[in-house]
């Protein structure tokens, strides 16, 4: 059986990013569980904003998105499609995810619309903040990602306040990495979207 592929999506623009360090804890734990891990730093592959093709006329699909967005959109979306587990890490920016991550979520409409290409992938969310807005950010991401066909293990999110990573948050991050891999093994490629 081939190894479970885990992609950690780092939505912070900062070098010494807390959410990225949290993501690393989850990825390390996923690797210890036998997965192949990769980190995608959105700041290194920033995506052009979504063109809004889905609105009213619904012309949005993967081919059109790549045609409009170019090579960087193709690279990133294909990396998502090739993964079994997608872990999203972001700082809270005004009660929501960072613009870097939001651009990706919007572009992921081209994987969702009419096709549900990410159906059955396992997801997780890690977030860092200083004052307020972590639960809003996480809820927002849960709603969108669930619509896109992602499934979540128990304890599928964690959030850390401030620069130092707390023991509790680290525990949740590691648990998420491990459980996401175990869940992907249990699902074993099953797909869930049916039109009937
Ligand atoms: C544009 C911007 C907006 C922010 N908005 C919030 C916010 O609404 N709530 C909050 O608690 N922190 C907010 N912050 C602070 C960051 O969420 C916080 O510093 C975070 O831990 C940084 O994570 P990182 O190190 O992974 O980049 C904001 C920071 C920036 C740059």
Image: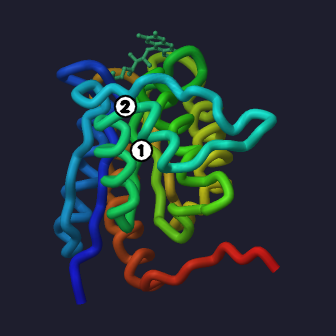
The image quadrant where one finds ligand 1 is: top left
* Along the viewing direction, whichever of 144 and 152 lies nearer the viewer: 144
Question: Badges 2 and 1: C-beta atoms under 8 Å apart?
Answer: yes
Question: Where on the picture, by quarter, is residue 35?
Answer: bottom left
Q: Is residue 176 above or below residue 41?
A: below
Q: Residue at x 47, y 58 (%)?
A: 123
Q: Is residue 53 in view from this perspective? A: yes
Q: Secondary structure at mark 1?
A: strand
Sooner in the amino-acid sequence: mark 2 or mark 1: 2
* Res. 88 mark: 1
Gap between marks 2 and 1, in whole Å?
7 Å
* Along the viewing direction, whichever of 117 and 121 lies nearer the viewer: 117
Residue 91: x, y in percent? Answer: 42, 26
Residue bearing the label numbered 2: 11
Q: Residue at x 43, y 85 (%)?
A: 188
Q: Residue at x 38, y 82 (%)?
A: 185
Q: Is residue 175 in view from this perspective? A: no
Residue 75: x, y in percent? Answer: 29, 45
Q: Residues within 10 Å of mark 2 (few under 14, many from 20)?
A: many
CB at disc 1 and ligand 1 closer than 8 Å: no
Residue 76: x, y in percent? Answer: 33, 44
Left or right: 84 as drawn, with respect to 99 = left
Count the marks.
Answer: 2
Colouring rule applied to residues:
rainbow
């Amino acid at each position: 059986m081939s190894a479970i592929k885990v992609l950690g999506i780092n939505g912070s623009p900062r070098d010494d990013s807390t959410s990225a360090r949290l993501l690393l804890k989850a990825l390390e734990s996923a690797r210890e569980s036998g997965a192949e891990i990769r980190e995608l730093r959105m700041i290194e592959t920033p995506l052009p904003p979504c063109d809004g093709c889905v609105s009213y006329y619904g012309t949005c699909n993967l081919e059109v998105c790549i045609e409009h967005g170019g090579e960087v959109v193709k690279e990133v979306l294909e990396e998502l499609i090739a993964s079994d587990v997608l872990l999203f890490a972001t700082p809270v920016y005004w009660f929501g995810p960072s613009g870097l991550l939001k651009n990706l979520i919007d572009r992921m409409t081209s994987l969702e619309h009419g096709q549900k290409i990410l159906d059955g992938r396992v997801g997780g969310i890690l977030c860092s903040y200083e004052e307020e807005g972590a639960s809003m950010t996480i809820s927002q991401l849960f709603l969108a990602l669930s619509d896109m066909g992602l499934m979540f293990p128990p304890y599928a999110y964690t959030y850390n306040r401030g620069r130092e990573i707390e023991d509790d948050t680290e525990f949740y991050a590691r648990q998420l990495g491990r459980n996401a891999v175990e869940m992907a093994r249990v699902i074993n490629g099953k797909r869930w979207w049916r039109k009937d």
